[in-house]
Image (spheres, grey):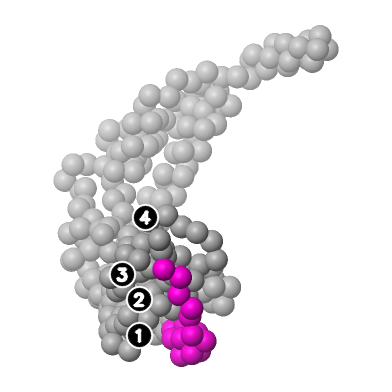
Amino acid sequence: MAEELVLDTAIRDWVLIPLSVVMVLIGILRYFVSKLMRTSQLPDSKIIKEGQVIIRARNLRAAANFIPPKAFRARKTYYTNEENGLLHVPKGQAQNPQAQMFSDPNMAMDMMKKNLSMIVPQTLTFAWVNFFFSGFVAAKIPFPLTQRFRSMLQNGIDLSTVDVSYVSSRSWYFLNLFGLRGLFSLILGEENATDDTQRMMQMSGFGFDPSKSLGAEKDGLDIVQHDWVLPKLEQRAEAVLKKRLSS
């Protein structure tokens, strides 16, 4: 039988509310600090050009059947020609995005600044919470939960008799750390720099490889089966009209 606890109001006033307010203030402060540390970089014209070429090639594949066969073959050759096609990337010119990132000092410095602006505040805040608020039962969720949530909600409390709906102070810290994205979006706007889960995903990536996208679009254009729909437009319209009238 799970043990029922009566939470003191002092825990709410001196643990729950201060911890929530501090997490919000640290998130806002980290946003402005990372904004100050961010360096303004001019976009690479080559990357912009390759991105525009990819978009145009996708539009050509999507609307291939709405242009005459001769026009489609001309555009297809313009993009996929093995000598000077826009989508053709010679083997020697393909760049490794990981090597490109480490060869650019500005990109490596920006990545290091982003990681520091995320890791340092989290480390200090977790040490503060672990030192001052360790072992507190801070809140209770107003609905029953299964035992699977015990490790998530009662981090730092080694009592199996306590009901799962009680939340420890350390778990409350982690819930605020990963659950305040909506609040930060309202305060700072959608394009804010406080989404820790997105940052952790970005830390494991090494950039975008345009040569793979160009090659994929080239292969997609090569296998397109062109079927001009304009000569059959009247027959299709007649068939649709007959179907509408018969129904």
Point out which mark residue 148 bears.
Answer: 4
Real-space Cα separation, disc 1 to disc 2, in angstroms:
7 Å
State which mark lies toward you, 4 or 3. 3
Q: Which of marks 3 and 1 precedes in the sequence?
A: 1
Q: Earlier along the polypeptide chain: callout 2 or callout 3?
A: 3
Disc 1 and disc 3 in contact, CB within 8 angstroms: no
Mark 4 touches mark 3? (CB < 8 Å): no
Residue bearing mark 3:
159
Rounded to the nearest whole Å, what is the CA distance between mark 2 and mark 3? 15 Å
SS of the residue under disc 3: loop
Vertical relation: 65 (above or below) 190: above
Dot 1 and dot 2 residues touching (CB under 8 Å)? yes
Judge depth for marks 4 and 2 and give the one in front: 4
Q: Find residue 195 and report its horizontal and vertical position in percent.
A: 42, 68
Q: For mark 2, what is the residue?
A: 170
Q: Check residue 133 in the rendering and tell me which mark sits there, or answer none.
A: 1
Mark pair 1, 3: CA separation: 17 Å
Q: Please say if 209 is above or below 243.
A: below
In the rendered structure, which disc, 1 or 2, sits on the residue that comes first in sequence? 1
Q: Residue at x 48, y 90 (%)?
A: 10
- Which secondary structure dominates the residues rendered in magenta? helix
Picture layout, residue 141 above or below residue 127: above
Q: Which residues are magenta?
A: 3-21
Judging from the image, what secondary structure is the residue with disc 2 in? Answer: helix
Disc 3 crowd rating (10 Å Cα; few below 14, some 14-19, many 20+) is few
Measuring from the top left, give residue 72's x and y in whole percent. Answer: 48, 27
Q: Is residue 112 left or right of residue 34?
A: left
